[in-house]
Amino acid sequence: MSWLTDAHIHLSDSEFKPEWQFILVAMDKMRIKACCVSMDYQSSNATLELGTKSPLVLPFLGIHPEKAGNEELEPVLDLIMKNSNKISGIGEIGLDRTYVSDENGFNRQVDVFEKMLSLAEKLKKPVSIHSRKTLEEIFSILPSYHIDGVLLHWFAGNKKQLQKAMDLGCYVSYGPAMVYSQDKQILLTQTEPSKILLETDGPVKFSKCFGYKTTQITFLPSVLFCASQILGKRYDETLEAIEKNMNSYLGV
């Protein structure tokens, strides 16, 4: 029987911590695993802690672009190296100009991002990338590294950028917004079937039918159902395909 995996969720976020026990039970009952991404040194440690509580949690450690200026690079790199046999990947990493005020700040993001990519290449780990409005910069950097599992999470590019992502062999993930966003639905239909992954990005809040509720990992089957409808496939057929894609992304 297949397992559904959330490709990108911040389960170690403090908002979820009081509910960890209940979330893990729900994941087990619903046959859901989670790529648990981190933001900085503190959340990376929390991710490692959560990973000890359940094999359904797949730890990803890294520095989010919002945190790239906090001088935590070396401690996080060291943490990744010391726990390389316990983690499934590196993330959330990437670029985002909305978090900086000048080119010096953005250059710092680039430096942190490239060092994370270099470590992922060395350790042969997949990466989960934040690429809001920086896809072109990221596309120019990725060819310098050989990483088999590259995920552009919450893909928000245009059709041309989607094709570039496919040409580079990247995976892209779609989340709850796809349930109500026609643009995301169109992008899904134009994504190589073998490169599609699904996510929630919890605890991000989504509008429309989700009513700005804190996103739970239990939303994921609804995202899968929506994807199956858009792709014109059965739910179980889509589940099997997504599981295969996830295993390829993780290298398992």
Image (cartoon, grey):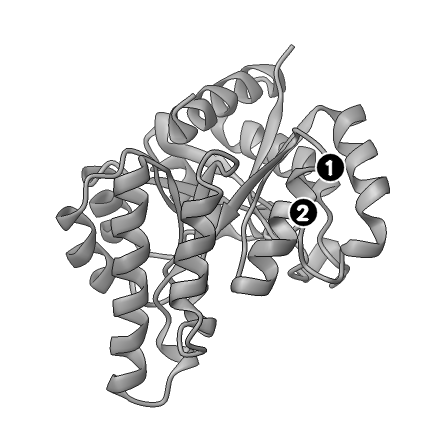
Left or right: 41, with 193 as reference point: right
The answer to whether residue 193 is seen in the rendering is no
Inspect the image, locate mark 1, and give the three-letter code of the amino acid beneath it. Answer: Lys
The residue sitting at 45% across, 60% down in the picture is 76
Residue 91: numbered disc? none
Split into 4 quadrants, where in the image is the C terminus?
top left
Quarter where residue 84 is shown: top left
Foreground residue among 101 and 118: 118
The x, y position of residue 147, in whole percent, is: 26, 38
Query: Residue 201, percent across and down?
Result: 59, 52
Read off the residue under disc 2: 49
Neighbor class of circle 2 (other Cα within 10 Å; few <14, some 14-19, many 20+) is few
From this viewpoint, which residue is outermost toward the top? 1
Q: Is residue 217 something one can see in this rendering?
A: yes
Establish if 116 lies above or below 5. below
| Dot 2 amino acid type | Glu
Relative to 102, is 74 on the left or the right?
right
Tell me the quarter of the picture where residue 56 sits.
Answer: top right
Whether tag 1 and tag 2 are in contact, CB under 8 A, the answer is yes
Q: Quadrant of the N terminus?
A: top right
- Give the image location of residue 25, x and y in percent: 83, 32
Which residue does the image show at 15% across and 58% down from the upper left?
Answer: 140
Q: Nearer the viewer, residue 219 or 102?
A: 102
Under circle 1, the secondary element is: loop
Residue located beneath label 1 in the image:
53
Relative to 163, residue 136 above or below: below
Residue situated in front as seen by the camera: 54 or 160: 54
Pointer 1: residues within 10 angstroms few (<14), some, or many (20+)? few
From mark 1 to mark 2, how far is it between C-alphas? Answer: 7 Å
Q: Image point 50% across, 46% down: which residue?
A: 60
Farthest-out residue, bottom? 101
Secondary structure of the residue carrying numbered label 2: helix
